[in-house]
Image: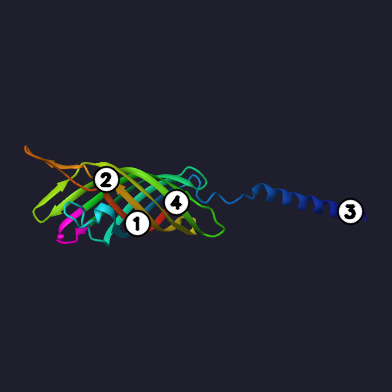
Amino acid sequence: MRSIHVTMCLAAVLVCATTSADAVTRRSAPPLLYQRTAVSGYLGKDLPVGEFADGRAGYGNQEEGAIDWAVEIEHFVGRTTSLGFSYSEVRFDDKTLGDSLQTQVQTASGFLRIVIPTATAIRPYIRFGMGGVQLEFLDPFSREDSDWEFSIQAGGGLLWLPARWLGLNAQALYYHGSTDDSVVFTTPDEIVVVGFDTEYWAFAAGVSLFFP
């Protein structure tokens, strides 16, 4: 009887020890976004609006449907908030002259993205950024650059995380560049400026790789 009692005590000690070890080694899942870095690429189409699309003389007269691409890097400084840098480029055709006269838009911006938590793997987000924009006018015989000017971007989208290291994005961003008085070139007799602000929507899909 004594040996049975001792055996039961030893078994109880082993169970307690095993449970304690599990409690020590078991860890919660690491944060999905916090303190992680994402590198992203986007591809989409653009819709000029405002003065940029206006067909009157002296305005943009830009055709819709231009292909837009962007590359970004961001770091999540909060549970759902990131700070990042974005570079985008798009080349618009003139509505009247087609690809004989093109306007290339280059935008470099810092941005803030806020991801809204949900109970699913798909999370909406909003973002805002500011930086600089430069226009480049191209025809078969010349290429003229404007000065860099202030620009903003704002919009939102959806982020789907099918895996811890992979994110898929769908977003719509509004870009506005204060390029109306941006100087393109000067001569002894005149100063040539852009003459209109740069305004367009970019609708894009993107892929994000998360580290670590």
Q: Residues within 10 Å of mark 3 (few under 14, many from 20)?
A: few
Would residue 198 be found to the left or right of residue 153 on screen? left
User: Residue at horizontal 13%, vertical 42%?
Assistant: 185
Q: Earlier in the sequence, mark 3 or mark 1?
A: 3
Tell me the number on the disc at residue 126. Answer: 4
Q: Which residue is mark 2?
A: 133
Residue at 84% x, 51% y is 9
Amino acid carrying mark 3 in the image: His
Q: CA distance from mark 1 to mark 4?
A: 16 Å
Disc 4 on helix, strand or loop? strand
- In which image quadrant can residue 181 be found? top left
Q: Which residues are magenta?
A: 92-103
SS label for mark 1: strand
Name which residue type carries label 2: Val
| Residue linked to disc 1 | 42
**Which residue matches tag 3?**
5
